Image (tube, rainbow, N blue to C red):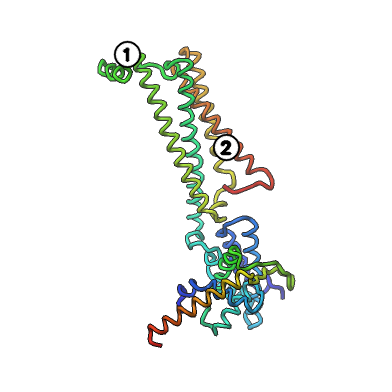
Amino acid sequence: MTEAAQRPAGREPVEDYLDKLLLTLSGSARQVRRTLAEVEAHLHDVVADELAAGKSQAAAEEAAVARMGAVHVVSGHTAQFSRPSAALLRRTALAGSLIGGVALVAFGISGAIAWGLATVRGGSFLIAPFPPGSYTSADCARWLAGDPATHNCITAMTADHVGEIISTAIAGGILGLLTLAAHWWMRRRWQDRGTLTALPIGSAEAVGAILALLVAVGTLGQGTDLELVQRGQGAGQMFSLGIAALAAAVFFAVQLRHLALPGRRRAR
Amino acid sequence: MTSERLKGNLDMLLLAVLIAGPGHGYAIISRLRERSEGAFDLPEGTVYPALHRLEHAGLLDSTWETAAGRRRRLYRLTAAGQKSLTAEAQQWRAFSGSVALVLGG
């Protein structure tokens, strides 16, 4: 009678154990393959001994798995790495921190682009002044206090708004770098196959590229509309965001291409 | 011996088992169980992270061998492993001697 015929239908303790072990192992592909091969040979040796002792195939396999111990004992990780839901949460955190970090860094870069555009085409190209009647003399006094060299409320208002745009972008960029640092730290820590394969390889990059492209199209379109309809007033902010979003989309597309190239695939 | 105490000394015990000759994971854990007369009965998978760690530290090296149609990784002690074992065994004897004195045994 063959091995499979001796085993009750659906019960493959050794195969199930090796499947679970694959998800918890971390390290290079070669290290993972090697550990799997060693453990598989070990399990089959134990099964052979248990069969020689008179057990059935199914009982021998179950005894071999019990003697081997929980998968985290072999992988060296803690037991939490064996839970699929925890793996998905970790993978989602990795994807979210990558997309969010790159988005915030791109936002930071848009501040530099905005500064350049304001320098070349003036502050009102970046942001249109508030319409008359929407601000008070107290607002004017506050803006003028921030820019003593000018005596014009609209010029001071525009300079204040341009400063806000750039400083907000810088803050966003710094937050983005911190988020990417957190992403790097998590990626180094969570190298188990369960985490890395909980979502399809390249899914974070694909989602990032699509979202960045949508933002680029939307903001560049709006900037073009402002340039044509409102003689460019306020178009600069949209253009700066659009260019930065386009750069982010290119970044994600390049990362996706690296993952898709044969022999260079690496789960992120 | 509690499993925690055993974990702290597992590396030394694996090196000691390999003094007798090369072995693969199953053989190593079986030898450990036999030589301790059943006192050291760990989950057998515990041996693999320890063996890989010892190999990474240069105290063991390993090669693949094929027997009965199955590949097994055979581990052997290196010169550095032998030296490390000698040093650790000396430390252990000194430690256990001191413990015995304190316990009045």
Q: Is residue A94 above or below residue A248?
A: below
Q: Is residue A121 above or below residue A164?
A: above
Q: Residue furthest left?
A: A138
Q: Are marks 2 and 1 in contact (CB under 8 Å)?
A: no
Report crowding for label 1: few under 14, some 14 to 19, many 20 or more residues within 10 A (C-alpha): some
Mark 2, chain letter? A
Front residue of this view, candidates B64 and A258:
B64
Q: Quadrant of the N terminus of chain A?
A: bottom right
Whether residue A14 is visible, yes or no, is: yes
- Residue found at x 59% / y 60%: A22
Residue B79 appears left or right of A85 = right
Foreground mark, 2 or 1?
1
State which tag comes first along the sequence, 2 or 1. Answer: 1
Mark 1: which amino acid? Cys
Image coordinates of residue B99 in percent, x first then y, are 41, 81
Residue A128 quadrant: top left
Mark 2: which amino acid? Phe
Mark 1, chain letter? A
Q: Is residue A128 above or below residue B16?
A: above
Q: Secondary structure at mark 2?
A: helix
- For the residues labelled 2 and 1, the Cα–Cα distance comes to 43 Å
- Residue found at x 57% / y 39%: A206
Report crowding for label 2: few under 14, some 14 to 19, many 20 or more residues within 10 A (C-alpha): many
Whether residue A11 is visible, yes or no, is: no
Residue highlighted by disc 2: A252
Image coordinates of residue A174 in percent, x first then y, are 43, 36
Q: Is residue A107 above or below residue B22?
A: above
Q: Secondary structure at mark 1?
A: helix
Q: What label sits on residue A153 in the rendered view?
A: 1
